[in-house]
Amino acid sequence: MADRLEFTPQETEEAKAIYLQLKDAIGQYLLPGDEEKIHGHLKDSMEKNRVERDHFGLNPILFGFQTAKIVVEEIGLKRDAVVAILLHPSVANGFMSIDDVREQFGASVALILHGLERIAELYAKNPVVESENFRNLLLSFAEDMRVILIMIADRVNLMRQIRDTDNVEAKMKVSEEAAYLYAPLAHKLGLYKLKSELEDLSLKYLEHDAYYMIKEKLNATKKARDAYIERFIQPIKEKLEAAGLKFHMKGRTKSIHSIWQKMKKQNCGFEGIYDLFAIRIIIDSQPEKEKMLCWQAYSIVTDMYQPNPKRLRDWLSVPKSNGYESLHITVLGPENKWVEVQIRTERMDEIAERGVAAHWRYKGIKGESGLDDWLTNIRNILEANDDLQVMDQFKMDLYEDEVFVFTPKGDLFKFPKGATVLDFAYHIHTKVGNACTGAKVNGKIVTLREILHSGDQVEILTSATQKPKPAWLNIVKTSRAKSKIRQALKELQAKESVFAKEMLERKFKNRKIELEEPLMAKLIKKLGFKEASNFYKQIADGELDINHVIEKYIEAQAKETGAGNEQPAKSAEEFNLHAESNANAGGEDVLVIDSNLKGVDYQLAKCCQPIYGDDIFGFVTVSGGIKIHRSDCPNAAELRKRFGYRIVKARWSGKGTAKYSITLRVVGNDDIGIVNNLTSIISKDEKLVLRSISIDSNDGIFRGNLVVMLEDTSRLETLIKRLRTVKGVKQVERI
């Protein structure tokens, strides 16, 4: 059991003084019984040894009073925030529940304490606080904005108290968080005094020598600096007043932190900082005269002091993208010292300080526009000084469409709401996603379908035997994960196709059957597969029996070569070219073979579907007829190689009046109305007949096969040209 917390005389005196100050400031906001209940609770906590000094040796009760003083005096919070601060140590140590607080002090105090507890849980996961995502997660965990304001005040107080601590490591961590997280938040909320204090104290602890070097130089020149600024301002005032301008002026010295940042950025010493002094001239002007009056002031200043043209920043003519308007010049004042002068109007100054383009937006950490607008509203509430009653109802609804999730090491990632464990896995690495079998979320094993929630700590589980599945596309939420899954599925299918093809070739070799690619390609289509990859995938998956494929191949080969037919295959030389009526020719279409003889018994090959006008050749079949192939038929090379003696020259003669069936392959963007646009082009031509259309759409790409009846190649070429003009169509080709 720890020793009872004892107040030192100095701590007792300070606590009493702050107590009286708080009572004087917020006494009118306290409810009947508040003071007695809080006093009794703190006294009971001390008597029962429920509170003890922290790892810095600080008294938690006094620390609470000090923080409460900051939120009242510097921020403007009232009763609920003060009560929550004083009760927080007991709630954090489990000696008082949120329900107890709600019953004794109301729902608003309970809500603040609940937010503080959630953020304490967040810190327990050892997050990387330097990330923008952590700042966003911190805000999303604060159901009431007062939670963030209290935490800023708490950090300012802590930075003030740890100056002489022996716990150097903890002191460094606290200082880093102040610089990376709390100072930018204070800046965004318009708490400039607290922001500067956080920055200066963090610099003091993290870079001791630099801080004191700058401080000593500033202290050594303070009186001279103040006098100098007055000497600089006075003649400008007289000239501006003589010109009839209504204005006021502000003089300032950069903070120690700002000076150090400038020294590092410009890689120079203290004396090399041009704008150590800064003057702001704020003009009272009507909107239509703003630019004119600003440039008039500029002219007056530059007539008096020599300007540095390299340091002119004209955000008056062309405002910054965030709306910031001002005229910045650096002039050489008395004693050859450089002074920055900012010239703007009241309206510009109001926008720069409070509005959409506040100064912090381009000097502080940039965040998402929704966050910035929301924080600006809060800052305006703070500056309105209206008792902050609106804060009681203010709830965080920002990031309702986003979740922030931790890795076991404390790294933080952002995902859209509804994202799953599988999204997280693919965000880590493609290989992790491909092998994902599930995860441990907050120590509990879950499936890869588990939906993530803000603050979850996720550890991915993998297996070497796991493979991506098409169904995974319906599990993931992010486009990144979907893209990686599709890529993995394609690679997997390609590997399986190669494996299946090798397996099929081995089976053919074992049975001493020669595998002909053109014939296999025809067989694959005959078996109903549009793509060879799907055919091989079914073999790899065991859905298609290899022996069945081999039997079908043997049948196709026998039919192609005429095996089993008693009639010997004729050569082209033996073919008797007698003129016979040709029922298949139809109309005036005439096929001329070699010696321009008509009426030969022929058929159009189904493998390439030749039409009138195509460059063709004839192939003598075992039955004595001729099959007509296009010269660019997929099987042409194999036929010439193996059966050159059965090839017959052929050409068309006469006019193409019969209608031939051709298939067109169309590829394009899957846009609304693309099918209607394609079919309307065909329907407008009376000599074209659309027999069928098949559509396949995937990943925003439209693929379709159009079977059209037409007369000749010239009409085909015209049709292809027209189809290519359809918006969204990328490719049209005959197959």
Image (spheres, rainbow, N blue to C red):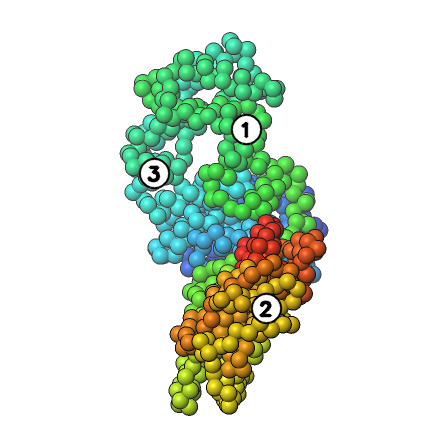
Query: Residue 379: which numbered mark, if any?
Result: none
Mark found first going from the N terminus, 1 or 2: 1
Residue 591 rendering spot, x and y as whole percentages: 56, 66
Residue shown at the point (37%, 44%) measured from the top left: 203
Query: Residue 265: which numbered mark, if any?
Result: 3
Tell me if label 1 and label 2 are in contact, CB under 8 Å.
no
- Say how many tags the image has: 3
Toward the viewer: 695 or 307?
695
Q: Is 358 rendered above or below residue 470?
A: above
Density class for disc 3 (Cα within 10 Å; few <14, some 14-19, many ≥20) is few
Displayed quadrant of residue 301: top left
Displayed quadrant of residue 694: bottom right
Q: Amino acid at mark 2?
A: Asn
Secondary structure of residue under mark 3: helix
Tell me if label 3 and label 1 are in contact, CB under 8 Å.
no
Using residue 130 as the reference point, say whether residue 115 is left or right of it: right
Mark found first going from the N terminus, 3 or 1: 3
Using residue 60 as the reference point, say whether residue 585 is left or right of it: right
Question: Of all residues shown, which one is farthest toward the top?
Answer: 242
Toward the viewer: 461 or 506?
506
The CA span between labels 3 and 1 is: 26 Å
Displayed quadrant of residue 38: bottom right
Mark yes or no: residue 180 visible: yes
Mark found first going from the N terminus, 3 or 2: 3
Toward the viewer: 669 or 184?
669
Residue 95 rendering spot, x and y as whole percentages: 57, 66
Q: Amino acid at mark 1?
A: Asp
Residue shown at the point (54%, 28%) measured from the top left: 349
Q: Circle 2 sits on which residue?
A: 474
The CA span between labels 1 and 2 is: 52 Å
